[in-house]
Amino acid sequence: MLNFRAYPSLRTLIPFLSGILLYLFFPITKLYAFIPVLILFLAVGIYLYRIKGQLWAIRSFSIVTFLLLILSGYGFTFWHIQTNHASHYRYHISSSNPQNIIGVIDDMPIKKGKNWKLTVEVQYVADTSNTNSRNFKNCTGKILVYLPIDSLTEQIRYGDELAFNTQPRAISRSNNPHTFNYPRYLFFKNIHYQVYLRSDEATIMSHNNGNPLLQFAFSTRQRFLSFLEKYLNQPATLGVGSALILGYKGHITEEIQSSYAGTGAMHVLAVSGLHVGLLYLILNTLL
C-alpha cells in the first residue's frame, strides 16, 4: 500500500487535481459564490492552527487543509477559464450585428487545406463600422479565424495584428455521434468562438507584436517545416512526421486523424518535438 506520508507533494497534488475535476463537472460562473466559502475555510484553518497540543485540532486542521487545496484547484480552474472574466470579448459583442475586432495572432498559423487557421488574441471590440471609433473597448479572449490562402494572406505570421469586421459564432459540436468533441478540446484552450473571413475582410495592421522568444521559435520551426515539406512528398508521411518532430498539426489530414482516433492512438500525434528531443538525449546517454 502506498504510504502518502512519504510523498508530501502527492498529498498536495491529489486534492488540488480533485478541485480541478470538481469544477469541470460543477462549474460556477460568478466569483462571489466561491469567495465566502474560501474565506470561511481560511478562518477555520487559522483558528485550528493556533490551537496547540490538541489531537482533535490537529486532525481537523488536516481536513480543512485538504478542503482548502480542493478549493484552490477549483479556484485556479475558474480563473483559467477566460469566459469567467468580465473583460472577455463575449460580453462586448452583439448577437445580431457585425463587430469590429482587433487582435494579435498568438500562435503559429496552420494551413488547413486552402485556408489559414489562426488563433487570435482579441484586444479591442466595437459594435460599429468605423474602425477609428472611440467606442472600441479593451477585451481579452481568443478567437479562431479562418482565412483563405492567397496573395493577400500568404505572408501572414505569428505576431501580426489583424483587424476584421464580422459576427463571431460559437463553436458547435458535430451532429455525428461518437465523433471527437472538438468544442470541448478548444474549451480547454480558451477558444469558444470562430469566424470565417474572405482575404479582403481582414487587414494586417502591424507586425512583430508577439513575444520575441516565441517569434524566434516559430520562425525556426517554419524553416524546419519547409525542409520536411521539401523531402517528404507523401501527405500522410509529411503529416505524421511534422507532428512528431515539430509538433505541427497543420498537415494532418482528417483521414489520418480519424484512423489514429479509431485505434485509440490519437495521443501519439500529441507528442511534440521537445519530447522527441528528450527521448533522443536519454537514448544517446544510455547507448
Image: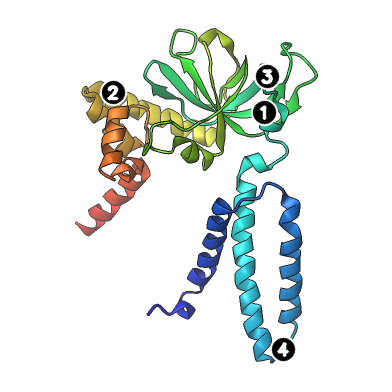
Q: Earlier in the sequence, mark 1 or mark 2?
A: 1
Q: Are marks 1 and 3 in contact (CB under 8 Å)?
A: no
Q: Is residue 152 left or right of residue 134?
A: left
The disc at residue 96 is: 3
Q: Report, in whole angstroms, how far the alpha carbon at label 1 lies from the one at label 2.
A: 34 Å
| Three-letter residue code for mark 4 | Lys
Q: Report the number of discs.
A: 4
Q: Report, in whole angstroms, how far the alpha carbon at label 1 lies from the one at label 3.
A: 21 Å
Q: Which residue is mark 1?
A: 123
Q: Report, in whole angstroms, how far the alpha carbon at label 4 lies from the one at label 1.
A: 52 Å
The one nearer the camera, 34 or 220, is: 34
At which x and y percent is residue 2? 40, 77
Q: Secondary structure at mark 1?
A: strand
Q: Secondary structure at mark 3?
A: loop
Q: Secondary structure at mark 4?
A: loop
Q: Is residue 266 left or right of residue 80?
A: left
